Amino acid sequence: AAAAGGEKRGKKRNLPDSLKGSGKDDGFADSMAEQCTCCVCQEVLHRCVCLLPCLHKCCGACAVDMLRHIDRSAPLGPLVRRMKCPQCRAAVTSIKRDHTLTSLIEVFLKTNPDRNRSKAELELADAKDKELQTYLDSSSSSSSSSSSSA
């Protein structure tokens, strides 16, 4: 069983053309892009979030799209517990920002600007992400107030 898992982990995915480098010395950049690819949109992660408990990552805007697929008009909070991870299908219990990975991706994109999304795509993703940020802010303030009252 361990060998099967090792084979799966070592298997190379084909990068979409939008993530492939343009030069012949792009092996490291290609590996970074592969590791920083959203499992939903297949682009470099933008405002990365972590799905708990499985710890898989996706863009904040992609998380909103998945939640809105469940229910277009309901508040995000109750929808999170109805969400399944798009990568492993585990039930999601919470969504948290991955600030460390987001920072690493920002550095990566500064040195590889050709791998970034267009300005219009980023503006659309940021607009969707604002809704998620409102949910994240309210869920973190409610969890800190409940822990301080204990």
Image: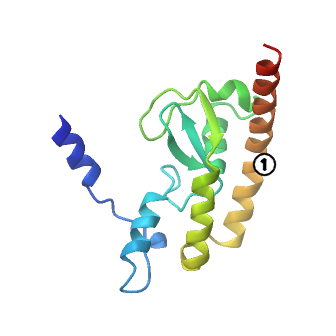
* Image quarter of residue 93: top right
Of the pair 59 and 6, the residue shown nearer to us: 6
Q: Is residue 29 left or right of residue 149?
A: left
Q: Secondary structure at mark 1?
A: helix
Residue 60: percent from left, percent from top: 65, 48
Residue 72: percent from left, percent from top: 71, 35
Q: Is residue 126 above or below residue 136?
A: below
Quadrant for the C terminus in the image: top right
> Residue at the bottom extreme?
23
Q: Is residue 120 left or right of residue 103?
A: right
Q: Residue at x 26, y 55 (%)?
A: 11
**Residue 45 seen by the camera:** yes
Q: Residue at x 17, y 34 (%)?
A: 1
Write down the residue under mark 1: 130
Of the pair 97 and 131, the residue shown nearer to us: 97
**Residue 116 seen by the camera:** no
